[in-house]
Amino acid sequence: MRFLLALLLAASAHAAKTLDIYFIDTEGGQSTLVVSPSGQALLIDTGYSNFSGRDADRIAAAAKMAHVKHIESVLITHHHSDHEGGVPNLLERLTAGTFYDHGPTVDTSADQQKTFKAYEAAMEKQHRQIAKPGDTIPIKGLEVTVVESGGEHINKRGDANPFCAGVQPEPQDKEIAENAQSAGVLIQYGKFRFADLGDLTWNKEIALLCTENRVGKVDLFLSDHHGGETAPVVHGLAPRVIVMNNGARKGGDPKGWKTLKETPGLEDLWQLHFSVAGGSEANVSDTMIANIEEHCEGKFLKVSAESNGAFTVYNSRNKYSKSYAAK
């Protein structure tokens, strides 16, 4: 009897040792809760500030589900209201350790200055650190590397990216705009690799991934710009699975969706929302969409990854899940 109990406990402990990633619906914003097998957590972005604290409530609900009471690190990819706006609301619901960002905002618009000042006010009682390319964000059990931040990329060699042939910088690319300053990360758990590059612009993306891929191939990719993609980038990363963090009417445009779907080696694309612009032509099946109604209940997608590279994607709306074997 004791032997059987020991086996059951061992099996349970083994089953619990997954990296869990919650892609939280902020209806066109961004927030991703990354929970290490150690129990420590990294939150990437916090969604919007308005809507009566809706996004912070959804983050708190995901944290409760993951048994997270304290978030060790928060990465703000860039200072736009759909990514950093929810910080004050979040801190009313959960405690957090160090906040990482690329530095002061470069967006001088009145609305953005208001959002950034609210963020700075919240940081007066928090520990804040500027993330630089090559830095690591300490989360026990994971390797979290900053690959891009403040308009600069990580200084390392990479394999040739065959999808960069003929790619040229765009003269109208907003080199110093806030999106271009995005802090992007590569998260590794054993053989499993996940990349989130924020809202990098064309020129910054190709500097990072062309003609050398400085990130390497990944298993999972969170789409840039809520589903507006640069083909040489996403195709060079060669993800097995892509999560598109679109809203019903933000992101998920047919052109970007097509770029994602044409990624060589892609096994599946999952969406946080049905895209109104995509209609019947540029959406995946309802089974793999977390929210199919425009006025939704904030359903999430969850990825559970093992250190051997195997992972499972779970749709909280319909309880559907699909597993991807280790390679």
Image (cartoon, grey):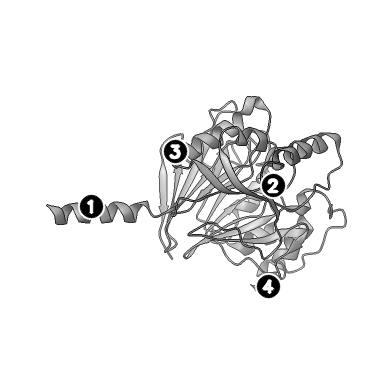
The relative height of residue 213 versus residue 322 in the rendered view (above or below) is below
Q: Which mark is residue 225?
A: 2
Label 4 vs label 3, nearer the camera: 3
Q: Which residue is rendered at x = 55% and y = 45% of the image?
A: 71
Tag 3 or tag 1, which sits nearer the N-term? 1
Mark 3 vs 2: CB contact within 8 A:
no
Q: CA distance from mark 4 to mark 3?
A: 38 Å
Task: Give percent across and percent down for residue 49.
Answer: 68, 32
Give 157 or 287, whichever is nearer the viewer. Answer: 157
Tag 4 or tag 2, which sits nearer the N-term? 4
| Residue at numbered disc 4 | 156
Q: CA distance from mark 1 to mark 2?
A: 44 Å
Q: Secondary structure at mark 3?
A: helix
Label 2 vs label 4, nearer the camera: 4
Q: Which residue is rendered at x = 52% and y = 43% of the image?
A: 70
Q: Secondary structure at mark 2?
A: helix
Seen in the image, is 139 located left or right of residue 81? left
Q: Which mark is residue 8?
A: 1
Q: Which residue is rendered at x = 66% and y = 68% of the image?
A: 214
State which quadrant residue 148 falls in.
bottom right
Q: Which mark is residue 123?
A: none
Q: Given the image, on which type of amino acid does mark 2 rest?
A: His
Q: CA distance from mark 2 to mark 4?
A: 25 Å
Task: Give percent across and percent down for residue 170.
Answer: 83, 58
Q: Which residue is rendered at x = 41% and y = 44% of the image?
A: 321
Q: Secondary structure at mark 4?
A: loop
Q: Given the image, on which type of amino acid does mark 3 rest?
A: Met
| Residue at numbered disc 3 | 65
Q: CA distance from mark 4 to mark 1?
A: 45 Å
On the question of residue 286 being in view, the answer is no
Mark 4 vs 1: CB contact within 8 A:
no
